[in-house]
Amino acid sequence: MDKILRLPDYLKRPIASLDNKENKRVKNILSKYNLNTVCDGARCPNKSVCYGCLTATFLIMGKTCTRNCRFCNISPSYPLPLDENEPKNVACAVKELNLDYVVITSVTRDDLEDGGAKHFKKTIDEIRKLKPLTKIEILTPDFKGDKKALDIIIESMPDVFNHNVETVPSLYKKARPQAIYKRSLEVLSYIKKNSSGIITKTGIMTGLGETEEEIIQTIKDIKEANVDILTIGQYIRPSVKHLPVIKYYKEDEFEKLRQIALDTGIKACVSSPLARSSYRAHETYNEIKNQI
């Protein structure tokens, strides 16, 4: 039986409340347009903060995933057909929330020929029709490394392209068995090589049993792939069915990793216990947009 570590107080956050008018407004708009968010699907600990700021990370292409990563709270099963109205609905929600910066992510759709790349492009196109000045960050699956799918993404020209490496290579078989470490790095490298104007970004988790040396090597590999932004956050076990937490890192350890990433040459690094892919996304974009 897995040893269960007690969640430290610094990782505890209040659950978003419907009594809060900002939270209620976000939830009402999501319901109005029949939209999902990764805030709910992945049980993000920052949900109350983001909803309180009248924003959310939109989760497109359904609520179920074709992969079974053992750290993720999104349910794995065969998904429903794509909702053709979803791209426009996302755009309407972005306009109604008056977002200057939006993050769009998705479940993995290995059942689709292009992995959902065209659906991402349609969503970006619809947002730009209704809110042309809004900056758009997308967090995508690896599309199985398919360059045709990646070319569709490049054609859509998001302001930021994010694909998470998630963990060190030695833990892939245990944590994300349907993914390939090298392939994820190649996806990030391909986007930057073929569209230098797109800011590239990735994220990793701590606490799954990796060593400091493995983290440092992964940071070096990420830099080698010409990634601009790195996020580093603590893995929090969604349920007893998921991988156990081996270690809770402290704030000073995250600061040390942030400095290592910057010293390696990565332009910006958000590293803290509750950092997630979209955490401080707009602020980090503004920090480095003139460097690209």
Image: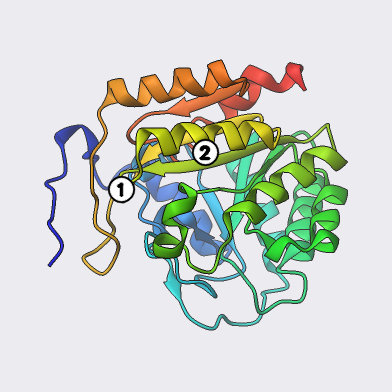
Q: Amino acid at mark 2?
A: Thr
- The disc label shown at residue 87, or none: none
Query: In the rendered view, does 226 fall on the left or right side of 147?
Result: left
Q: Quadrant of residue 27?
A: bottom left
In the image, what residue occupies the spot 32% across and 49% down? Answer: 208
Task: Provide the secondary structure element on which disc 1 rests.
Answer: loop
Does residue 163 appear in the picture of this structure?
Answer: yes
Q: Which residue is mark 1?
A: 209
Residue drawn at x 65%, y 81% is 81
The image quadrant where one finds the C terminus is top right
Q: Amino acid at mark 1?
A: Gly
Q: Nearer the viewer, residue 14 or 272?
A: 272
Q: Of the two numbered discs 1 and 2 on the same chain, state the one appearing first in sequence.
A: 1
Secondary structure beneath label 2: helix
Crowding at label 1, few (<14), some or many (≥20) Cα neighbours within 10 Å?
Answer: some
- Seen in the image, is 194 located left or right of residue 287? right
Expressed as whole percent of the image width and height from the top left, the position of residue 182 reads 63, 52
Q: Is residue 112 shown left or right of residue 168?
A: right
Residue 102 pos. (x, y %): 62, 41
Q: Is residue 277 visible?
A: no
Residue ID at (64%, 26%): 285
Residue 15 image position (x, y, % from top left): 26, 47
Q: How many marks?
A: 2
Residue in the picture at 44% in, 40% down: 276
Question: Hey, which quadrant is residue 256 in on the image?
Answer: top left
- The percent position of residue 65, horizontal first and vertical second, equals 52, 72
Figure quadrant of the N terminus: bottom left
Height in image: 170 above or below 70? above
Give the answer, above or below, for where 43 lies relative to 8.
Answer: below
| Colour option used | rainbow
Reading the image, the residue beneath label 2 is 218
